[in-house]
Amino acid sequence: MQNPFSRAGTAFMPALSFEGHRLVFFSLCLLLSTALPMQAEMSVAAPIPNAADAPLLLSLQECIEIALEKNLGLASTKDSILLVESSLALQQNTFEPKLHTTYLGSIYNSHLMQDYTNEVTLALTQSHKYGGTISLTSSLDWAEHESEYRTDPIYYPNEFGSKSDFTSTVGISISQNLLKGAFEKAATVSLRQAEFDVALAQLDLDELTQDLALSVKRAFYDVLKSQEYITVMQSSLAATKQDLKIAELRLTEGLSSRLDRSRAELVYINRERDLNNAKKQLQSSIDSLVSLMGLEIGTRIAPVPSIDKERVPILTDEWIEQAFHSRPDIKALDVQRKKYELNEDIAEDNRLPTLEAEGSFLMSETEDKFRESLDVTERTWQFSLRFEHSFFDTSNDELLIQSRIASRQLARTLEDAKREIAISIREISRQLKQLSEDMEYLERSERVASEQLELARLSYREGLITNRDLIAAENDYTVARIELIRATYDYLSTVASLERALGATLHRKNRAGTAQAGSNLFTP
């Protein structure tokens, strides 16, 4: 027989244990409060926690910025632009002034005489954009001659066997094309083409940047969607677990059959499987986002769900017009059209004959301190005209025809691209409208499914319905929530696709809920 006092002591044990825990906790607090100053003094030597163990909290904009900085494909494209810009710098250097300096020294030695000659030249050259060149030169020559015999005593009365002379020269030269190559486009064709290539490369980079931003947005939305799926699955799993306990209790009390209990257990197993699949999908979405951002695979990130879920007004015509002015591919076609027009002008210019004029003026002064009669100044003028033309060469005519055909084809390509853009934006507009309407229906369905689930739970507890009806109500509510989440993020992904189709960032409604004007709806 059990001792009643022992039963009473056992009954009081939880209370005594709780009071003991409170006493221990109070003592620990006292010890910690006395140790706080010491810890504050020793905080400098405390180890810093490893930041790699904590996930990175990143907003959508931060994810895009990291991707634009670390994505490998985008980095390669940026390097390609540097190469094109280097080619442009080389072409620009052609029209920069050039300053050249040279020095030439020589010694001639034989058994009878020895000569020392020196020459220093300084030249400044400038090419201009109309196919001409201006050159300014200056030179200084001096020489020393020594010999072992007097060759001419009349001119060397004081020195025997040696002489020296100095010559300084200043000259200017101007050359100019008069026909072929005499126009700005023709003279700067290489420079203009390099500028077009840089512009095209930059527009390609802009297009890749927008594609990357769209991919990051979609991956970010997939992560948030998977997280919300997990939340729904966890809530559904908790409710199903509670239903399983109720089914077991009702089976114990004889209020339900083993079939009801097995049915509840099967639903619980299915919910566990759905939760496990949702977690795997979340990890796959995170890996995709991390890969797009250019981070190391396995990096732990935690997206911050601070995104704008407001719906945008449908402005199809304004969107189409904006896309024509903002999209990088349309701008690239326009740059390509200008490049073809330049090729046409060059082809027409090459059909002209070559006529080049060149004039120069040279002034030199010679000084000989031993022979005063040779101190003279010379001035020389020179003018030349060069004519050249191929009378039976039709290659330039064919190049002109090819350039005109390419321009016509590009005009058709541009028109076709605009039509495709218009069709794409109209389709996106229809998708946005359809998704917006679906979200309204799904929000109503979720509210009705929630009310239906509450009524089903009350009825099940009262024994008015079987667990089959309760399971059906829970399924309806779970499906309604998941469908609403899916439609919401499909809508956000479609808005991101719209921004990519526009080549711009779409402004949402402001906090007051009013839509901005159509002219202020976009940011290039």
Image (cartoon, rainbow, N blue to C red):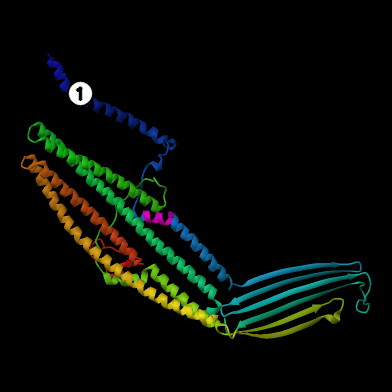
The quarter holding residue 413 reads bottom left
32 shown above or below 181: above
* Amino acid carrying mark 1 in the image: Leu
The reply to whether residue 302 is in sight is no
The quarter holding residue 183 reads bottom right
Tell whether position 63 is magenta.
Answer: yes
How many dots with numbers? 1
Where is residue 294? Give x, y as percent. Answer: 42, 52
Q: Nearer the viewer, residue 113 or 511?
A: 113
Residue corresponding to mark 1: 16
The reply to whether residue 491 is in sight is yes
Q: Which residues are magenta?
A: 62-71
Picture quarter with the C terminus: bottom left
**Residue appearing at x 45%, y 68% in the figure:** 200
Picture quarter with the N terminus: top left
How crowded pointer 1 is (Cα within 10 Å; few <14, some 14-19, many 20+) is rated as few
Where is residue 437? Give x, y as percent. Answer: 19, 61
462 shown above or below 119: above
Q: Which residue sits furthest top?
A: 1
**Residue appearing at x 9%, y 41% in the figure:** 466
Q: Nearer the viewer, residue 407 or 316?
A: 407
**Residue appearing at x 64%, y 75% in the figure:** 125
**Residue appearing at x 30%, y 29% in the figure:** 28
